[in-house]
Amino acid sequence: MLLEGKVVLITGAARGIGRAVATVMAEEGAAVGLADRAPEVEATAAAIAALGRPAAASVFDVADPAAVERGVGEIRRRLGDVQVLVNNAGIVNNIAPIPRMTHDAWEREISVNLTGAFNLIQAVVGPMIERKWGRIINVSSVAATGGLHNQAAYAASKAGLIGLTQTATLELARHGITCNAVLPGLIGTENVQQMPQEIREAAVATVPAHRLGETREIAYLIAFLASERAAFINGAAIPIDGGFGLNTLSLGSRKEVAAATRPQR
Ligand SMILES: NC(=O)c1ccc[n+]([C@@H]2O[C@H](COP(=O)([O-])OP(=O)(O)OC[C@H]3O[C@@H](n4cnc5c(N)ncnc54)[C@H](O)[C@@H]3O)[C@@H](O)[C@H]2O)c1
């Protein structure tokens, strides 16, 4: 098992990618701390406990540094020092072109998606430095490298996570700590399944793999990055997107997209 005896903390673990990461890490032998602002995170903890692994849930807002300190303290008391941190909590509900995006919406998205990760790193990194071992994985997005129409705050927050990841690596690598970012493409979470079918299908057609990713596929990469085997991967920003970032504007690719979106008779 990749994570036997390790204490991990995953934010945004009530559902979606975070829940899958928690489950896969438990299957790989970890004791799992789960954080979310949604009380449903208790159900993820119960499912992990049913797998026979130690689990502890804490309900807090990652954007609130004092609440993060309290929540991380609660997890530490129940499971021990956090050795692996997965910054996964994120929001994606602020959709507006730049001239109409409100300052409040901008601030909130940056606070949750970017400052939240900073808050968590600050709260767990002391004991990692003392133990000379730690893993930090930040869940960014393909939007970090290509932008996203009408989602300036989201794309900026996810690009900011890459700068945070790289700087954490520069500062922490000498303490035996790695920090990496994963950049998922379109993954079949509740959010994505609720998109209008037409938009979802058009997006899927531009993915060379012609399908949505699965939450467990993201979780397998994160579990590997958290393991001993990934010790020399540091400061990386790793796309996991079925080839979404490749050149889909070439003539051959456009013909394939047209064929994939053509209505079937
Ligand atoms: N689903 C995708 O296609 C996709 C693609 C790229 C990146 N991502 C990123 O992956 C992560 C997970 O995405 P998902 O689709 O599973 O999202 P989701 O909305 O299904 O789950 C996110 C979880 O984070 C929690 N959360 C939100 N704000 C919080 C806060 N302030 N404090 C604590 N918890 C909070 C929510 O309650 C929820 O349980 C996000 O960071 C998202 O940006 C997702």
Image (tube, rainbow, N blue to C red):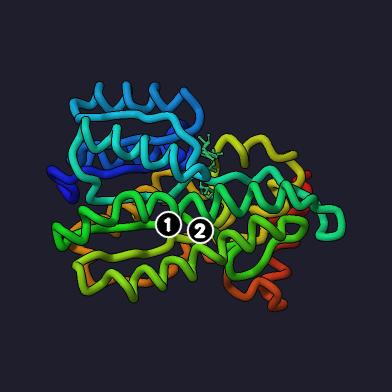
Q: Amino acid at mark 2?
A: Ser
- Disc 1 residue type (three-letter): Asn
Q: Residue at x 75, y 48 (%)?
A: 95
Looking at the rendering, which quadrant does residue 73 occupy? top left
- x, y (%) of residue 226? 27, 55
Pick the front one: 228 or 131: 131
Q: Is label 2 within 8 A of ligand 1 (CB to nearest ligand atom)? A: yes
Please give the count of numbered marks on the rendered protein.
Answer: 2
Task: Identify the residue under disc 1.
Answer: 138
Apparent side of residue 200 relative to residue 39 in the rendered image (left or right): right
Question: Which numbered marker is on residue 13?
Answer: none
- Say which residue label 2 marks: 140
Check whether the beta carbons of the residues at disc 1 and disc 2 lie within 8 A of each other.
yes
Does residue 212 appear in this view?
A: no
Q: Position of residue 188 (x, y in %)?
A: 55, 42
Give the residue at x 33% y 26%. 45
Secondary structure at badge 2 equals: loop
- Location of the C terminus by quadrant is top right
Name the residue located 34 percent from the left edge and 64 percent from the top edge: 179
Determine which quarter of the picture holds residue 18.
top left
Q: Residue furthest front?
A: 66
Q: Residue furthest right?
A: 99
Label 2 Cα neighbours within 10 Å, binned few <14 / some 14-19 / many ≥20: many
